[in-house]
Amino acid sequence: MARVVSLKKAKSAAVPADGREELVEIAVDLFAARGFAGTSIRDIADVAGRSVSNIYHYFENKEALWFAIFERSIKALPGQLREAIEGVEGPRERFIALVRGHLDVTEHYRREAKMFFIDEERLSPAGNRINKRVQRDILSIYVAEIEGLRRAGLLAPGDTQIAALNTLGAINWYLRWSRAGMSGPKRAEVVDQVLQFILRGVGCA
């Protein structure tokens, strides 16, 4: 169950920044907690301590805020995943590097990842196309690496795409139950357990 953001608490915790960036930060918190459909421009204005008209001075509508968040975070995720496996030799080693890299990125963009890959959103057709395109790009990276495991005889019997979707499901669920801000040995232990679970699932533990 998504946590409910207290408007009063969120307002006091707003990041002091230029007007536009402060609104983006507040929108990330609210979208991640309540979903896109469950957050209104009025909610964002109340947290920011501004008028609704002031929000529209910076953003044409609520979806324009969504695009601003997308541009600064999730849009770059496929490229970051490709960087995580660049130069890594061996199909199993590449897959491990991919999963670890993905867990690291989603930890850094925890709120944004929840917005784009967990919550059901009610975006415009254009917004949905962009969101789905990024998800397809990420899926294609995983399918390619899992195909590498298959060619090496390291993959359990089954459909490659389903194995990729199950892997992404495990990573996305990590965002639901893991504690934000976890670091050091505890996070390393949790990440290792998630990774071993995924490796067993695809048959190359």
Image (cartoon, rainbow, N blue to C red):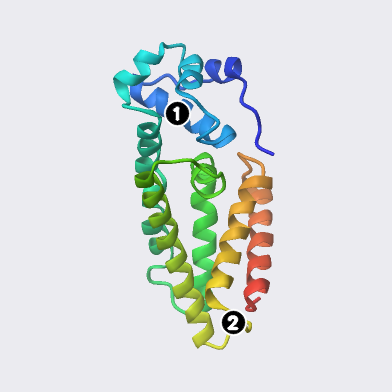
| Left/right of residue 20 with respect to residue 153 in the rendered view | left
The residue that label 2 is drawn on is 155
- Residue 165: x and y in percent read 56, 65
Label 1 packing within 10 angstroms: few (<14), some (14-19), many (20+): some
**Which residue occupies the foreground of this view, 27 or 124?**
124
Q: Quadrant of residue 56?
A: top left
**Of callouts 1 and 2, the N-terminal one:** 1
Q: Amino acid at mark 2?
A: Leu
Residue 18 visible at all: no
- Residue 12: x and y in percent read 55, 15
Q: Quadrant of residue 155?
A: bottom right
Q: CA distance from mark 1 to mark 2?
A: 41 Å
Mark 1 in CB contact with mark 2 (< 8 angstroms): no
Q: Residue at x 69, y 61 (%)?
A: 193
For mark 1, give the secondary structure.
helix
The single residue placed furthest to the front in the displayed view is: 125
- Residue 130: x and y in percent read 36, 50
Q: Residue at x 31, y 27 (%)?
A: 60
For mark 2, give the secondary structure.
loop
The residue that label 1 is drawn on is 25
**Which residue occupies the foreground of this view, 60 or 6?**
60
How many circles with numbers are drawn on the protein? Answer: 2
